[in-house]
Image: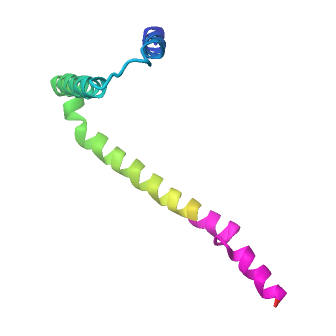
Amino acid sequence: MFIVISAMFVGIGVGFLLRRFKLGWLPRITMCLILLLLFLLGLDVGSDEHIVKSIPTLGVEALVIAVVSIVFSCVAAWLLWRICGRPGSNSEKEGENER
């Protein structure tokens, strides 16, 4: 982990030193490297027999976690909406009281 964090800070330092130069090619190289890393990750996962056999179980667990997260986020947003009220509701009530 120390190596990863160190590499990131070295990259920040080099980026800080090179900020005067136009690095228009950098996003393209970054995208290519990310795609290469994702391909290598897929290659590693696909070659691991234990992971491949447990994909259906992992998929169901991921689906359950996603659905529960969405439902509870919606419930929390609804509760917050009910507690705080609609935007502008206080100003509308104040306007009615002034009439």
Q: Is residue 28 magenta?
A: no
Hey, which residue is sitting farthest right in the picture?
A: 98
Q: Is residue 4 above or below residue 48?
A: above
- Identify which residue is drawn at 74% across, 76% down: 91
Query: Which quadrant is home to the C terminus?
Result: bottom right
Q: Is residue 93 magenta?
A: yes
The quadrant where residue 95 appears: bottom right
Q: Nearer the viewer, residue 81 or 71?
A: 81
Where residue 21 appears, as percent x and y from the top left, is: 38, 18
Q: Nearer the viewer, residue 50 or 45?
A: 45
- Identify which residue is drawn at 47% across, 60% down: 71
Q: Is residue 35 above or below residue 57?
A: above
Where residue 42 appears, as percent x and y from the top left, is: 20, 28
Q: Is residue 39 above or below residue 84?
A: above
- Identify which residue is drawn at 52% across, 57% down: 73
The quadrant where residue 55 appears: top left
Q: Main secondary structure of the magenta part?
A: helix
Q: Nearer the viewer, residue 63 or 3?
A: 3
Hey, which residue is sitting farthest bottom in the picture?
A: 99
Image check: 50 left or right of 65?
left
User: What are the residue bounds of the magenta stretch?
Assistant: 78-98
